[in-house]
Image (cartoon, helix red, strand yellow):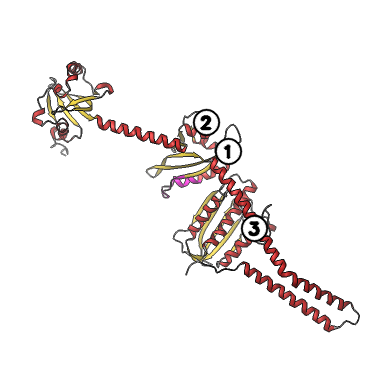
Amino acid sequence: MAHPFKDVNFEELFDAAADAMLLVDSTGHVIQANSAAQQLLEYSKKEICGLEVEALIPASFRNYHHQHRSAFFEKPEKRSMGNGKDLFALSKSGKELAVSIGLSPIKTQQQLFILITFYSADKRHNAEQALRTSEERLRIAKQAANLGVFDYDIQLNIVHWDERMCELWGEKSSESIKYKKFISTVHPNDRAVIQVAMDRAINPANNDGFLAEFRILSPNSDAERWVTTTGRVYFEDGHATRLVGVAQDVTELKKLEKNLQEQRAETESVFKQQVAAQTASAIAHELNQPLAAISAYSEVALHALNEFGHNPSTLKRALEGCVAQAQRAGTNLHELLAFLQAGELITERLDINDAVKEAVNIARRDGYKEFALKLKLEQNMSTVLANRIQVQKVLVNLLRNAVEAMRGAGIPNSAITITVRTNKDMNMAHITVQDSGYGLDTETAKRVFEPFFTTKPTGIGMGLAVSRALAEANGGQLWLEPNKRPGATFHFTLPFAP
């Protein structure tokens, strides 16, 4: 089989090179120059061939060049000229060109040749300057944002980091460490959060970056430091190999958020108490007169019964009054509840998967974020017909209850699983919210939807009652799955849009 390059000669290969090249014989004369060299030095091929190489060197450097050339021919080896110093070539027009020069000896049976390669020093300097400028900008940006940089080698399970990362982790040395030690400083309750974020990031199908927020425990005290991290995973042949990212200390921001959340929670609690008090007051006011009348009629009836030879007509009127006033009390109560729930229900087509994600973000912004989220969403699901705000209210309340239950029980690796699927039996969207707590005892499970029933020290017991009312107002249902372990499992359905 013929060699594919048998018809390609030396001159064609030499001339095709992108770098400027000269071929010099043992007498120091140019015998060949490629197109790049002719363009750089401003000579034609006919003009440059035969020139002594010193003619291409500025006059100030020529005196010593003969000695350097002779020494090189005595001990030829592939190397660069100048030992890192800037060199200059002289063009035909007398222009001095800053270049780097590489020398490569070529031995034949007849004699020794030198291949001289010119590299533009300006390009190198520009590249070096651009690199220095880029590094300086990165340094300033890191300093301004107080960022630490890390590079996690997933295959070797080693984390490389800079000084700021070491400072965040409370380490004195910036040497690389094993991932096991790296993760050991993270708060035990937050390690599941990192694992979930890592599982998503290293899955090529997700095309997601790494994003996690967690606490770092000081090795010398019980102090906690909040850190947010973001990064990118690199893959080879479909396998994750590296995670490169940055970390930022957000402890002060977390303290500010916590203070704002406490203030909002206190305000909301006061508001709920006022609403409950006003509602109870309104109910008491509306029922007071009918109940007083029922009491009076009952006393008349009892008096009539106790009297010897009682009058049946008096007893009948008293009992009829009791019935009328009881009906009045019921009517007043229904009218009051209708007034409190007044307002036209405005519905729209909703992507329930998006509604779930929005509810998660709302809950986390409100301070309910110390859990690992597992989303199991049915793709290409039909839209539902519901009120967006009310649906979010139900979902957020279920998430808050789950977090508070796990927080109160001190669950170390708390997780919440939200499943969205099509319930074919009911022809509805079916949302399941399951926590990893200890669940509810039988008595609590029976009463959990009762108004004013609560197991929380500061609760008023209206959250689940209102949530169930909102679910039913939107054409769905809300119920607790009994005896489900681990944790409590709530189910929420909504009708599909026609």
Instruction: Point out the frontmost of discs 3 and 1.
Output: 3
Q: Residue at x 42, y 42 (%)?
A: 233
Q: Residue at x 49, y 56 (%)?
A: 377
Question: Badge 1 is on which residue?
Answer: 224
Question: Badge 2 is on which residue?
Answer: 171
Asked if 459 appears above or below 11 in the picture, the reply is: below
Asked if the residue at tag 3 contacts the one at tag 2, i.e. Cβ–Cβ closer than 8 Å, the answer is: no
Amino acid type shown at disc 1: Glu
Question: Badge 3 is on which residue?
Answer: 272
**Does label 2 or label 1 sit earlier along the sequence?**
2
Specify start and end residues of the magenta stretch as a single range.
Answer: 196-210
Mark 1 surroundings: few (<14), some (14-19) or many (≥20) residues within 10 A: some
Q: Residue at x 11, y 24 (%)?
A: 51
Instruction: Point out the frontmost of discs 2 and 3.
Output: 3
Rendered location of residue 437, percent (x, y) = 62, 50
Is residue 461 visible from the viewing direction of this image?
Answer: no
